Image: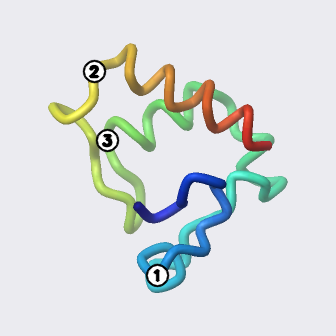
Amino acid sequence: MCHGADGLGTTPAGKALKAASFKDPAIVKTPDSQLFAAIKNGKNKMPAYTGKLTDDQIKSAIAYIHTLQ
């Protein structure tokens, strides 16, 4: 919803929240463990997905993020 299917963060919600692009060098360099923690627990304006996504689903989301980079 925020980052969009292309991961660029150009959706209306992404623009409003200033969601980072998954192609941003800072995101590209972020270790998977930190991405996992951000998705699971939330970070800044990003909500936590604990209870909404399983650990395996979070790992799949991270793998998808890498395909967009």
Q: Identify the image quadrant of residue 18.
A: bottom right
Residue shown at 44% from the left, 43% from the top: 38
From mark 1 to mark 3, how far is it between C-alphas? 23 Å
CA gap, disc 1 and disc 2: 27 Å
State which tag comes first along the sequence, 1 or 3: 1
Kindly identify the residue that appears in the image at 38 percent across and 68 percent down. Answer: 45
Sequence order check: which comes first, mark 2 or mark 3?
3
| Nearer to us in this view, 41 or 3 | 3
Q: Which residue is at 71% across, 49% downward?
A: 27
Q: Most extreme residue toward the front, as rendered?
A: 5
Q: Amino acid at mark 3?
A: Asn
On the image, numbered disc 1 is attached to which residue?
12
Q: In the rendered view, would you say 21 is above or below 60?
A: below
* Label 3: element kind: helix
In the displayed structure, 11 sits above or below 24; it is below
> Circles 2 and 3: CB distance less than 8 Å?
no
**What kind of colouring is applied to the model shown?**
rainbow
